[in-house]
């Protein structure tokens, strides 16, 4: 697609979680000092995090996203285990590094985080289903990775990424979707570059 190389190719895949309410000690002010208010139970969630730890993770992710600093989000990613929260960090990391991919270091960073998001997509989708949220049809890394691999002269690898996206029921935000992208990539493999250029001149 003509818009593939622009900086505005991504459909927002952001998962908006309700703001977490911090525990307050105000209730203790209304009772006798001798009365001890029991602390909230530390309930362990499915992914091994307690309720309080999950609230802390939510707040840390919200702060990082509000800041918009890629290195800060990248560093925080190392500490976050919840797949849904990791996806919230990975989407802006993938799109941010993708837009900076002309720089060699940032291109390497892009491939690293995009590969992570693709690898984690099954657990991301499962985690979103567990909290009762609508299943996303767009995961940023698939379209971006397909474009970058094609730019690097690896249309076969780009096709594999598109086929994986299709198997997961994902879309790329374009009219023809991943199926159309696969068709165009296969055409590049089958038709020599010189022949393709000549064909354009004829038509």
Image (tube, helix red, strand yellow):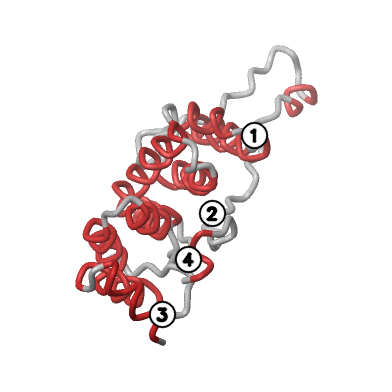
Check disc 2 and report the residue beneath it.
15
C-alpha span from label 3 to label 4: 47 Å
C-alpha span from label 2 to label 1: 15 Å
C-alpha span from label 1 to label 4: 24 Å
Looking at the picture, does residue 122 appear above or below residue 102?
below
Q: How many marks?
A: 4
**x and y percentages locating residue 101 in the rendered image:** 48, 43
Residue visible at 49% across and 31% down in the picture: 74
Q: How crowded is the residue under tag 1: few (<14 C-alpha within 10 Å), some, or many (20+)?
A: few
Q: Does dot 1 land on a helix, a strand or a loop?
A: helix
Q: Earlier in the sequence, mark 2 or mark 4?
A: 2
**x and y percentages locating residue 181 in the rendered image:** 35, 71
Task: Give the left or right position of residue 21, taking residue 132 as reference.
Answer: right
- The reply to whether dot 2 and dot 1 touch (C-beta < 8 Å) is no
Check disc 4 and report the residue beneath it.
134
Q: Which mark is residue 63?
A: 1
Looking at the picture, does residue 29 appear above or below residue 158?
above
Instruction: Return the residue nearer the eye: 150 or 122.
Output: 150
Check disc 3 and report the residue beneath it.
201
Marks 1, 3: nearer the viewer: 3
Residue visible at 41% across and 87% down in the picture: 203
Q: How crowded is the residue under tag 3: few (<14 C-alpha within 10 Å), some, or many (20+)?
A: few
Q: Does dot 4 land on a helix, a strand or a loop?
A: loop
């Amino acid at each position: 697609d003509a818009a593939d190389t622009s900086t505005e190719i991504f459909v927002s895949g952001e998962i908006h979680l309700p703001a977490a309410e911090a525990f307050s000690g105000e209730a203790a002010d209304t009772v006798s000092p001798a009365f001890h208010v029991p602390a909230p139970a530390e309930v362990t969630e499915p992914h091994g995090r307690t309720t309080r730890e999950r609230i802390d993770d939510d707040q840390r992710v919200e702060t990082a996203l509000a800041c918009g600093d890629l290195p800060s989000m990248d560093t925080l990613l190392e500490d976050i285990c919840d797949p849904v929260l990791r996806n919230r960090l990975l989407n802006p990391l993938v799109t941010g590094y993708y837009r900076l991919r002309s720089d060699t270091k940032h291109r390497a960073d892009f491939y690293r985080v995009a590969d992570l998001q693709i690898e984690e997509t099954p657990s991301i989708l499962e985690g979103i289903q567990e909290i009762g949220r609508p299943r996303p049809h767009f995961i940023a890394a698939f379209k971006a990775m397909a474009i970058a691999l094609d730019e690097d002269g690896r249309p076969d690898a780009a096709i594999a990424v598109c086929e994986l996206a299709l198997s997961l029921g994902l879309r790329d935000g374009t009219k023809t979707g991943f199926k159309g992208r696969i068709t165009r990539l296969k055409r590049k493999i089958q038709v020599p570059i010189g022949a393709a250029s000549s064909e354009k001149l004829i038509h």
